[in-house]
Image: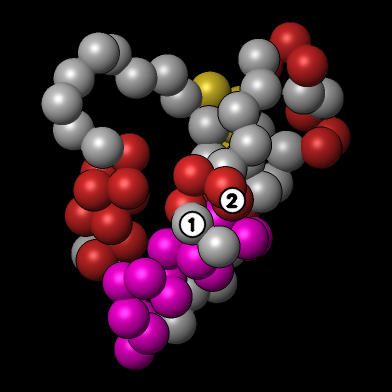
Amino acid sequence: MRFREMCFVAESKDIKNSELTDISTIKINSNDSVEKKTKDFIEQIKNPYSFKCGAYEVNIKFAETDKKLEDCLSNCIETL
């Protein structure tokens, strides 16, 4: 399954806070490949654009740029 197929994009008004995953509960094996880490992250977070971080609701939107989301997330996950 490709990364784009695993992502669910929704307007924040369509998502209830109780349905959001708390990012602090995400468990990633640091020995896995970047591809496996990315897949595990997406499967656990469910929606990488809207999630919780403790008491805070996080909604991500991107400016128009040449950077791909996959590259940005891979860079973040590599540091785990």
Find disc 1 in the rendering and name its residue: 2
Above or below, 35 relative to 33: above
Is residue 76 visible in the rendered image? The answer is no
**Picture quarter with the N terminus:** bottom right
Say if residue 43 shows up in the picture. Answer: yes
CB of mark 2 within 8 Å of CB of mark 1?
yes
Q: Report the magenta stretch's main SS.
A: helix
Type of residue at label 1?
Answer: Arg
Q: Which element carries disc 1, helix, strand or loop? A: loop
Q: Residue furthest bottom?
A: 31
* Residue in the image at 42% along x and 63% along y: 38
Locate residue 55: give its quadrant: top right
Q: x%, y% of residue 75?
A: 21, 54
The magenta-colored residue range is 30-44
Residue nearer the viewer, 71 or 15: 71
At 18% from the left and 33% from the top, the residue drawn is 67
Judge left or right: residue 45 versus residue 35.
Answer: right
In-image side of 26 versus 66 (left or right): right
Q: On the picture, is 50 further left or further right than 33?
A: right
Mark sitting on residue 6: 2
Density class for disc 1 (Cα within 10 Å; few <14, some 14-19, many ≥20) is: few
Depicted 7 relative to depicted 64: above or below: below
Q: Residue at x 46, y 24 (%)?
A: 60
Task: Tell me the colour scheme of the image.
Answer: secondary structure
**Which quadrant of the view contains residue 77?**
bottom left
Q: In terms of image quadrants, where is residue 68? A: top left
Where is residue 51 drawn, in percent x and y?
61, 37
Residue 63 percent coordinates (x, y): 28, 13
Q: Could you tell me which secondary element the residue under label 2 belongs to?
A: helix
Residue 8, position as x, y percentages in the image: 63, 37
